[in-house]
């Protein structure tokens, strides 16, 4: 079942996620529904806050054609998708940064250039309750950082330049107003 997406202006998006202490059938069901929602909305990542839950988890699925690096080869060929990352954290990163366009399902039709680390080492718990580690590059690294921001109540608008915020001011105000009317 596809879940409704919480859009900009919904207070749940500013809440800090709570650690998942046990992998229960409810967590499995939430992960399944989050993946279904992400696919239905044609996203590459979705945090629990974006569907109204404060569990510290997100899902990501980078298609192979979106995983192409600067040398025209896959950045993350050994990482099996989709990823369900529970209680994730970045434990290390390179100093090399990437600046590129980001969108967000909570900000429909809004994109902004955002600076992110090009490579990260992340740890998380999988749906079997096993702690995992991955080294991610490119779009996967960007997606992990973006979804981690959601778990900490940081939104795309917080990563935009001042100039971009001003340029999108009308769109952002309309979106927040529509969200509040729907609540």
Image: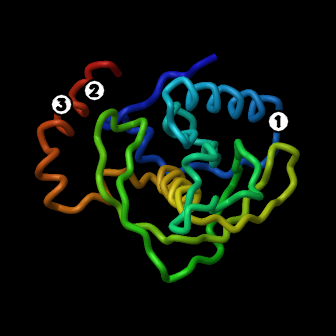
Q: Is residue 163 visible?
A: yes
Q: Residue at x 62, y 61 (%)?
A: 73
Residue 174 spot, x, y in % from top left = 18, 30
| Crowd tier of the residue under label 2, counting other residues whose Cα lies within 10 Å: few below 14, some 14–19, many 20 or above | some
Return the disc, 1 or 3, that comes first in the chain's sequence.
1
Q: Residue at x 25, y 33 (%)?
A: 176
The Cα–Cα distance between marks 2 and 1, rounded to whole angstroms, is 32 Å
The residue indicated by pointer 1 is: 24
Q: Residue furthest front?
A: 72
The Cα–Cα distance between marks 3 and 2, rounded to whole angstroms, is 10 Å
- Determine the secondary structure under disc 2: helix
Q: Who is closer to the viewer here, 24 or 97?
A: 97
Vertical position of residue 75 compared to residue 94: above or below: above
Whether pointer 1 and pointer 3 mark residues with C-beta atoms closer than 8 Å, the reply is no
Q: Quadrant of the N terminus?
A: top right
Residue 183 spot, x, y in % from top left = 35, 22
Residue 95 spot, x, y in % from top left = 49, 83
- Determine the secondary structure under disc 3: helix
The numbered mark at residue 180 is: 2
The residue indicated by pointer 3 is: 174
Residue 97 spot, x, y in % from top left = 44, 74
């Amino acid at each position: 079942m596809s879940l409704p997406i919480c859009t900009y202006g919904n207070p749940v998006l500013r809440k800090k996620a709570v650690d998942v202490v046990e992998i229960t059938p409810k967590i499995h069901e939430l992960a399944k529904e989050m993946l279904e929602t992400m696919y239905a909305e044609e996203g590459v990542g979705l945090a629990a806050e974006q569907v109204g839950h404060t569990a510290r988890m997100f899902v990501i699925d980078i298609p192979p054609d979106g995983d192409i690096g600067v040398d025209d080869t896959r950045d993350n060929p050994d990482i099996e998708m989709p990823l369900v990352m529970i209680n994730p954290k970045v434990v290390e990163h390179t100093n090399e940064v990437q600046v590129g366009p980001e969108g967000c399902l909570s900000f429909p039709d809004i994109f902004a250039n955002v600076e992110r680390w090009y490579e990260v080492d992340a740890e998380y718990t999988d749906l079997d309750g096993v702690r995992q580690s991955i080294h991610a590059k490119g779009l996967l690294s960007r997606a992990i950082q973006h979804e981690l921001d959601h778990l900490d109540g940081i939104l795309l608008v917080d990563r935009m330049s001042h100039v971009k915020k001003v340029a999108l001011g009308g769109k952002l105000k309309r979106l927040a107003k529509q969200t509040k009317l729907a609540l």
